[in-house]
Amino acid sequence: MKKTISINLSNQNFSIEEDAYEKLAAYLKSIKNHCGGADTNEVVADIENSMADKLKSSLSPYKEIITLEDIESLIKIMGTIEDFDREVGGSSEVENDEESLPENKTKRKLYRDSDNAVIGGVCSGLGAYFDIDPVLFRIIFFALVLAGGSAFPLYILLWIAMPEAKTAHQKLEMQGQAPTIAAFKNLAKTGKQIQDNWKKRWQKRSTIDKIFSLPLVILNGLFLTIKKVWRILWPICIFCIGIFLTVISLIGLAAISIGALFMLLFNNPIYKFSFIPITELTAVVPYTWLIITGFLSLAIPAILFIIGGLAMIRKKNFLSFAAGSILVAVWMISGIIFSALCLRYAPELKQKFDNYYTTEHVKQVIDLTEIEEIEVYGNRLNIFVSANTNTPPIISGRQIDLSSLEIKREDKKLIITQQKYQPEATCINCHLSTMELVVATSTKLRITARDGADIFDETAPIPEPIIEAENLSDYENSKATISE
């Protein structure tokens, strides 16, 4: 049995055996004492970050404790202080450090090299990966730009696809170097001098590299300016988007809530929809479940948008992963149930609408005995002159629509008048539909259409009827009066 303690290494928590901890602490202390100088903290931080990554990779669900063997294996990979002195030789100049890099190499990985970047570090990253002077890739991209501009989308694509080498470990992987103490020390010195002396870095470039890099340097300056402006404007844009998203989502959530409550209270015989009592429709479907699942399907996205908007405004996450997962799960389940209910009961609702006595489509035969003239009044009446001589005079439409007509005889004249209809206040979507009056051409009648009624002729020419109309919008190539 061994005693274990908990440590924090590079912002990562580990459980480690006591003897392994003492070995690790002594190792890190020796590195700090040996490095010294202004860059000690940077070097140690890079080493600790690399060590934390390696220790984390050694753990598994079946091995959760760092042992002494793990620390000894890690020190063997990183190297001891004696190894560092032997590899670097105690030189403090960057040039000497670069010449005395350790011989052990690792497989290179593709990263963007932002330390030697002109624009995004793509060319310098490719150069480091293939161990080629990046000027070659800059010449290729420059030539492609002159050839037709195909290099620009390619460069953007590579910029997005290639991760940036941010940590010291990633920079060593980019160069194919093993993550040893000497490598971290040399990398820190080299990076510091490059950042402090950009002119010296420019002077080290070849003439050809300067020629092809100058336009890119200018473009990079432009990008940097845009980046600085964008950094100022971006928080303002995020704040405004957050306010807009929050306000719109709150309004939407309020409307959804009021609508759902209204629908629940709306289930009353005094209310009608399309001339059908609501209770007749709700009896066909599981009404309460439809309201609940429909409300959740619409309300949960609105709630998530509100939380997202508040997070943009406050720059703080208000929703945990567990709570977010629960909301998304409830939303998906309610959406599936709501969709299934709609698909299941839609045919029955349609049948109810089609067969209900007030909305049922009916036909009524009109007796035209001794009638010589027909006058039609109303904008919901269409008169069709049929070419079929055997067609009886028929007026058709929904039962509720036909009930709004007044049909009367005066001598030898038949007058059909559409009465004004005032829908009930408790009836939603209660509007009259168009009705049709079909008359055969064999019938010798004078037909007059007034107050918006239309006449449609299915014959050309018309052999028998005499037709007078005030509205002939669909009566092509006709005159106001047509006689035999």
Image: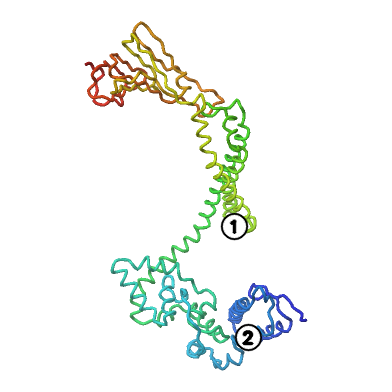
Q: Which mark is residue 176?
A: none
Which quarter of the figure is the N terminus placed in? bottom right
Query: Please, what secondary structure does the residue beneath circle 1 have?
Result: loop
Q: In this view, which residue lies farthest toward the front? A: 390
Q: Could you say which is closer to the camera, residue 377 or residue 111?
A: 377
Percent x, y for residue 218? 38, 69
Residue 198 in the image: state x and y as whole percent: 45, 77
Q: Whole-percent x and y of residue 400?
A: 48, 22
Q: Residue at x 68, y 79 (%)?
A: 66
Tell me the quarter of the picture where residue 426 sits.
top right
Tag 2: residue type?
Ser
Placement of 406 over or under 387, stated as above or below: above
Does 123 sit above or below residue 396? below
Q: Where on the picture, by quarter, is residue 5? A: bottom right
In terms of secondary structure, where does tag 2 sit? helix
Q: Which residue is mark 1?
A: 315
Q: Which mark is residue 73?
A: 2
- Within 10 Å of disc 2 (Cα), the crowding (few <14, some 14-19, many 20+) is few
Residue at image position (67%, 73%) is: 13
